[in-house]
Amino acid sequence: MNRRNHSFVMESKLHDVKGRVDYISSPKRQENLYAVFSNVEDHYWDLLSDQNQRDFAKSGTEGTCIEARELIIMLPPSLIEYDHELLLKYITSVFLEKYDVGCCAALHHNKSKTNLHIHLIFSEREIRQEVERKIASRNMFYNEKGKHVRTKKEILDEDGNLRPGCKIIKKGEVYETNFFQPKKEEFKSNVFLQNMKQIMTDAINEIVKDENEKLQVFQKGSPYLATKKIGKNNPKEAEIRADNYLRRAWNRNVDRALLTGASEAEVMTAKQSQIDESVAESIREHGQDPKLFTGILQKAVGYLRGFVEFLRETKYCDRDSEGNPLLDHDVRIDITPEPLQAKPKGERPSSVKQEAEVMRLQQILNKMKKQEQKIYAIEKAIVNLEKDLKEVKKKWFHRKEQKELEGKIEDKKVQLEKAKTTLDLIPTQHGYQNALEVTKAMKTAKTELKEVQLAQKAWDAPKPEPEKMYLRIPANEQNAEKREMQKSTGQKKSIHERLEEKKRQVQNADYVRQRKIHNRDCL
């Protein structure tokens, strides 16, 4: 089934709305802040915080006051190419068309610029058309916590003086000013977040140009994972294929779990704990990093595969009153993360070309070395002849011998010049100027050959086996004691004993049947 990328819209509760607004909108605190949009003045958040804190104190509820809420909206990477302010206003206006509340939004990139997203902080309260001011019909007394008390005595010390932090609102004075309506219950429901995911997904898809980046809201009600569509010339094709491979592996193990006896609720619990929660935590800490998501899927598939193994292992076990299997031995379950799909090897890298080049250059160098040795031999011969000539010149009546030596020296010098010329011609004949160029070419050729040989070695190497990971489920002691008691009293045998007995019966039946066939053939 072809599906698109999943949209990510997360919600969080804010206990310090003023500090959070400052954090997301401050260029000093954000390294990659592109745009900020707000439909209210800064003092709006002070008024909102004060009213929320006051109402929370009056309610007597334990915990921490929720002053506002925040949506974190992940965007496809290509949207960074749009005008930043227009992009932010467009997304924010989609929210404001549905909810008439104060908000502040900021367009960010994470530090590594792999996660483009919007922070949208909004009030749970609509602002009143007219400010509500409550007038005291009698003197009103408030303790240090701002809570209204019935009598004046409750805010006085032992000497009858007003305790620090306590206050008295006199009759006729304003004791409470409300700028906002009560909180909208809609914002507290799960339906709100699901609706916002759909609304934001539709809005983003309206402006995304590349079909491969269009999003869909993933339905959480299914234990299966949707695969992604791979469009033409998608630069992330290999990454998507690896991701789809793991998704299909998960879906296959979902089928196996259901067929082995697991309930849909059990599989959904595994999906939530191993994928949904892990992905949400990863996005909060690192943004949308495909490599991290791949690792989460690998571990999740290994876990689900182990769950199927556990179901099969405990299929015939006795159960307690709640349906849990009673184990009379430790169960070791293989939860090794699912390995990635092996990449197609293709043809084995060929080194014929590189080997031929090394041999060609080696032959050139050999010729040059041989020629250099010839030059050295001629030079050595000339030195010996000149030494002999020097000795002859010291003697009388050796003119003829002297001329012969001089002639030989001249012949050797001519040979030497020819040999040197030949040495110069050898690299030139093969397209090189000198020995240095040939040597450099040989070094390059050997490097290229080594690279191909390393590629061949990698191609020939067997695929490394992933490191095994196991989960040990200890035996149920009560069941072990029960088994020992049954064994000692000759009562009901354990499930494993029954399985072993059944196995022996089958083996004996097979043996008898084979003997009958053998005897019949002999007759």
Image: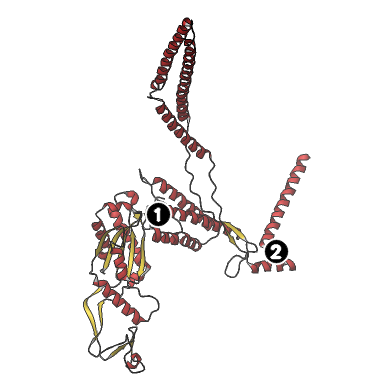
In the image shown, does 300 or 432 lie closer to the viewer?
A: 432
Bin the neighbour count of mark 2 within 10 Å (Cα to Cα): few under 14, some 14-19, many 20 and up.
some
Q: Position of residue 513 (x, y in %)?
A: 73, 47
Q: Amino acid at mark 2?
A: Lys
Question: Above or below — where is 229 with respect to 319?
Answer: above
Residue at 46% x, 54% y is 295
N-terminal of the two: label 1 or label 2?
1
Question: Above or below — where is 503 with respect to 419?
Answer: below
Q: Is residue 347 visible?
A: no
Label 2, secondary structure: give it: loop
Q: Which residue is mark 2?
A: 493
Residue 33 in which image quadrant: bottom left
Viewer-side label of 1, 2 = 1
Tell me the distance, in whole angstroms, between the alpha carbons under discs 1 and 2: 53 Å
User: Outermost residue toward the left?
Assistant: 130
Q: Position of residue 311 (x, y in %)?
A: 57, 59
Q: Position of residue 171 (x, y in %)?
A: 24, 91
Residue at 74% x, 44% y is 517
Label disc, if present, on residue 289 of the rendered structure: 1
Bin the neighbour count of mark 1 within 10 Å (Cα to Cα): few under 14, some 14-19, many 20 and up.
few
Question: Above or below — where is 438 with respect to 25?
Answer: above
Residue 34 left/right relative to 333: left
Residue at 30% x, 56% y is 204
Label 1, secondary structure: give it: loop
Q: Is residue 327 visible?
A: yes
Q: Position of residue 464 (x, y in %)?
A: 54, 46
Residue 23 in which image quadrant: bottom left
In the image shown, does 118 or 495 lie closer to the viewer?
A: 118
User: Outermost residue toward the right?
Assistant: 523
Q: Amino acid at mark 1?
A: Asp
